[in-house]
Amino acid sequence: MADVRPFSGIRYNPDKVKDLSRVVTQPYDKITTEMQARYLQTDPFNFVRLILPKADTRPDAPDSPTDPYTASARTLEEWLDSGVLMRDPAPAIYVLEEEFETDGSKRTRRGFVAAVRVDEFDKGTVLPHEFTLSKPKADRLNLLRATRADYEQIFMLYSDPEREIETLLRPEGAPLMAATDEYGVTHRMWAIADPRRLRRVSELMAGKVLLIADGHHRYETALTYRQEMERAGTVHADAALRFKTAAFVNIADLGLLILPTHRLLFGLPGFTPDVLKQQLAEYFTVTAVTPDKAQDELTRNKNGHAFIAYAGKDACFLVRLKDKLALDRFVAQDRSADYRELDVVVLHAVIIEGLLGIARDRIEDHVRYERYWNKTLERVDSAENQVAFLMNPTRPEQVQALAAKGERMPQKSTDFYPKLISGMVFMDVAHNQNLSSA
């Protein structure tokens, strides 16, 4: 059973921080060096100082921390002591609403932020859907050890077709917090502290299987930290460190959006567009299209395995799978039919690894990733890359079906949009902090 609970959030004090938009950030793993510098310049209390801190190693600052993790812990302590950050007096579930624009129309994604007990994946209450790399986990673990603060939420999906939880948590009045990020997404948050409503939400969530949509590294980091603390001594059954904050979104929510992540290939020996067409021809139909029509053609073929291969303005092709024997040849036989139906699997297993001959352990040496269509084309036109494969997005029901079978998707299979911003609310996971059941 999933154990979802309210928590007493730590958040910016509106008396000290008047404009929340100046201090919130994108998730740590989406922050480039340039973005980090911009955040640091924007406001002295910007959240980047906590989630992606810089150590002060100047000779004239001998008392400053010499590692970034200790720097974050010290900043957190200073902001709490000075009242920049405040702790809500009562446990709450935080209703989240994100308003954004896509394809010229406005959409709203709704969910809520709460704490979920961290269980091993084999217990089946929390399911992953992608593989992770070890380096980001080590970095986040060091930060968690130093700060004992759960700074950023993970993004989880649950199924509630009757929308009972959404009805229970319908907010009233003005939001407690509101911020607009650099991409024009407006984020609003309300705190629900009514014990009756909180208890009912926990009861309803107990019967759910939860799917990690985004934030696998952070979940696995929380699990590792809990295991470390258990080995070090007794940990209370309801200790906050046994939980991870998450933003929960109903998979039936009309605002739920997955964007495709396009692939850019480089360093391919002997590559030409004609050679590529010959390599693809065995299992795919390859039809020339003009770049201005390519996106419409790809969308029109979204129910089949179709891609746009772009090697320049005069080398743009619609690529469609014509022979599913390719799946038998290049995809492991123990994989489910749902796995084989993923476009990202066809692209990686059949085209990138099978026909182009790029070994799985060399993917990082030949493949880059890009969210935006036009930028993908530009990165080929600039000669930075030799060819791009542009994709249709993975559908939420595909993610759910694979996770239910215990199968993980290749990395960069999903890009849930918008990203959860960091800095709205977070949780103290110090050893003396416990969470009461609702």
Image (cartoon, rainbow, N blue to C red):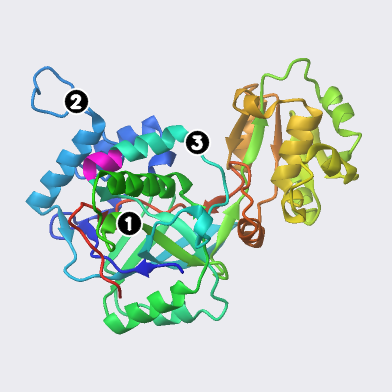
Q: Distance from label 3 to label 1 (Cα)?
A: 23 Å
Residue 133, label in figure: 3
Q: What stretch of residues is rendered in magenta?
A: 143-147
- Residue 396 on image: x %, y %: 62, 60
Q: Judge by depth and name the residue closer to the eye, 437 or 326.
A: 437
The image's mark for residue 66 is 2
Mark toward the start of the polypeptide (2 vs 3): 2
Count neighbours of disc 3 (C-alpha within 10 A) and say few if under 14, some if 14 to 19, many if 20 or more: few
- Residue 145 belongs to magenta span: yes
Residue 118, percent from left and from top = 40, 56
418 sits left or right of 130 in the view: left
Query: Between tags 2 and 3, which lies in front?
Result: 3
Label 2's element?
loop
Residue at horizontal 49 percent and vertical 74 percent from the top: 207
Disc 1 to disc 2, C-alpha distance: 29 Å
Q: In the rendered structure, which disc, 1 or 2, sits on the residue that comes first in sequence?
A: 2
Q: Answer with left or right where residue 251 lies relative to residue 291.
A: left
Q: Which residue is mark 1?
A: 242
Q: Amino acid at mark 1?
A: Arg
Q: Is residue 279 above or below residue 178?
A: above
Relative side of 309 to 239, left or right? right
Query: What is the crowding at mark 1: few (fewer than 14 residues within 10 Å), some, or many (at least 20)?
Result: many
Query: Which tag is nearer the camera, tag 3 or tag 1?
Result: 1
